[in-house]
Amino acid sequence: MEHKKISETAVKIKVCGIVQGVGFRPLVYRAASKMGIKGWVRNVGGDVEIMAQAPKTAVDQFVLELKENREQRYEILNIKVEEQPFCNMNEFIIVPSGVAEEVSMVPVDLPVCPECLRELADNSDRRFGNPFISCMSCGPRYTIIEEMPYDRGNTAMKTFPMCTACKMEYTSPKSRRFHAQTISCNDCGPYLLYRDSRNPEGDELSDREALKKAVMVLAAGGIVAVKGIGGYHLSCSPFLEQTVVRLRRLKGREEKPFAVMFHSVSEIRKYCDVSMDEETLLKSKVRPIVLLNMQEDSMAPSANKGSICCGAFLPYTPLQHLLTAQLGPLIMTSANVSGQPIIREDDCMLSCRDTNLDGVLYNKRKIVRSVDDSVAKIVAGSPQLIRRSRGYVPYPVFLQKDTVPSPDIFAAGGDLKASFCLSLGERAVVSQYFGDLEACSVMEEYKKSYQDLSCLLHVKPGLAVCDLHPNYHSSRFARSLSLPVISVQHHHAHIASVMAEHGLNGPVIGVAFDGTGYGTDGSIWGGEFLICEGKEFVRAAHLHPFPILGGDGSMRDGKKTAICYLHHAGLKHFLPDERSRIITAALDNKINTILTSSMGRFFDAAASVLHIAYENRYEGECAILLEREAVRYKRLHISPPSIPFLITEKKDLLELDPSPFFEAAVRCKEPEKRGALALSFHYETAEGIAGICERLRSRYHTSDVALSGGVFQNTLLIEQTFTLLKERNFRVYINRLVPPGDGGLSLGQTYLGREFLKTGDI
């Protein structure tokens, strides 16, 4: 025994990172067994704990192999090794999970893996055609976890007892499904079911008959609600105009394009341009909806509504693979009336009596939490998120480490494209996307999700951070939590989100362009140049402000915004609307008027003046259609007219004034020149940004520029701005890990909350 004590060592290894729900424990088991290491491995909170006893050289090699991660299945953030007293162990085993006060990481949902897809298509395999096939490397995680650690008994799979064959695989170290918590097969469920929405009292079909019926209905031009891992989708053919029109009635969605799911990248290439970077993003483990340039619109006119982009994505569940393999491209849009939360409850979906819905394809595995599909695109050679949800949530954004521990923080975000953030030290967990909190049902979902994620992560916030806007629902909720509350300016939070992502402390020139945000002077900001450092900011420049009617309510009416601006700019002879007399009278008498410096409103006005769009029937529609016309003209490779914006200075503040463009636009009588002027508006906006930044660099002695805000979801504008700033030797930073729009606000608020805690100013 003395010799054994001397020749062997015992250590406890704590592994932090994405190590639950990815087959890490079975991998540890195999590696330990191969090297003759005795001990055990278990889940604890969101981490994995290993006890290893063997000669020191073997233990060192074991730890090295874990760090090397040759199979790239997991992601280790930190490994801590502590020596332990020697004890006699005879084998290496997987032991029951432990309990931890803190949960460091929760696994994200994973797409079906290539090995499972091969089994799915193999008619000699016992899981042939199984719509729930999964293994230790794939399947739902976040959407089925009820509590951590990630064990079958803590998931929605606990209601499906394993059959004898699955139990053997689950307990066999040689199996791919060794300790795979989502293991299932055709014998032990879940099972596929189909309910005819037009005859709800009729017989319910199951298994392959259910799939066969759904395929038949979809092929015939029907609409079927299909249960996914984070909620229901409404599915139909994108090629049948009458069907897509029915889908729009069912969704209550007038104009916004629908996302389309394709069986493969080669199929996507038939309709869209796909670069290597875009292909990599499409095939990534997230499987997001990727915005791609359409080659030609060969789908039904109502599918894309004339958009130059298609939101394309690949199947990520076995059922989606089965459907698209037989039917080809399918619209897959969240099953909810526009503006309402995504549907995840079976009873809610089955009770739908809308005559436009033909059937429901579902199963009885519970969806614990709703998670919509993520949306992304390639900008300046790298992915940019438009909506951060399935596949990304709840993976944290890692912030700079604090030298002094700080309390957990709840950051409430904004009211549009709402998401909140919970921070645990340097880990900032941004929630899934919810939508507009103005809808009571969305606000209730937001509140429930706050409680749910707080419990799942074992977070007890000691500080709340919210938007400065006094009437935001998210801010009211933050103030209801009986916590110390810090209110931060909207555009400051936008820039802080970029600083958080890139580990910047400042000073940074922050360019925050969006539709609306409450300013410190009580006006509506939205075209801001801020100098940001730590928790402080200085408003150094902004777009030339003008009065509008109706405050936040003006966001929908682009034509009214155009009248307000033209009246302010002295272009009264070109007022375009029969309402002009009433609107200008209200402006002259300052009735229900407020100043705005919003770039979003300037985009609306430009689209209206150029007769491209007059109304935002969905958020940002005028700007999207203005960009469409600009991109179409750019493809002609003809230079647009140069109409530089003015840069002036008032009271030590620089102003960017687009009035020269608007004067040229209202005088333009030739419709064929609209595209040229639309492109000019984008180019001159980018040139104006670069010009302001050059002046601010000499004044504030920094070359770091952060671009954020919803306007920078405009690919043409952000890429042109990025290029011009790089040419002028600026270091340019943009959002990558969270959206540049309001979906990223909560991360910026978290950053600022930490900065306030550092200085003790709370």
Image: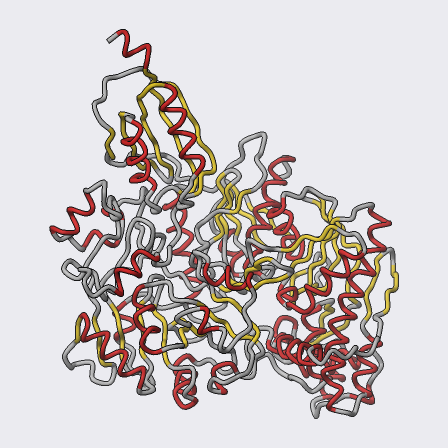
Instruction: Work out which quarter of the rendered image holds the C terminus and state it.
Output: top right
Q: Position of residue 93 (x, y in %)?
A: 23, 32
Quadrant in which residue 600 is drawn: bottom right
Instruction: Work out which quarter of the rendered image holds the N terminus and state it.
Output: top left
In front here: 126 or 364?
Answer: 126
Lateral position of residue 181 relative to residue 739, left or right = left
In front here: 163 or 395?
Answer: 163
In front here: 675 or 638?
Answer: 638
Quadrant in which residue 353 is drawn: bottom left
Badge count: 0
Residue at image location 63% in from the left, 53% down from the top: 493
Q: Position of residue 674 (x, y in %)?
A: 73, 85
Residue at image location 31% in from the left, 28% down from the top: 35
Asked if residue 555 is positioned above or below residue 170 in the image, the reply reads: below
Q: How is the image coloured?
A: secondary structure
Q: Position of residue 406 (x, y in %)?
A: 54, 35
Lateral position of residue 141 relative to residue 157, left or right = right
In front here: 263 or 502?
Answer: 263
Asked if residue 512 is positioned above or below residue 546 in the image, the reply reads: above
Q: Position of residue 631 (x, y in %)?
A: 67, 76
Lateral position of residue 289 relative to residue 309, left or right = left
Quadrant in which residue 618 is drawn: bottom right
The residue most toward the top is 2
Asked if residue 665 is positioned above or below residue 487 in the image, the reply reads: below
Asked if residue 389 is positioned above or below residue 265 in the image, the reply reads: above
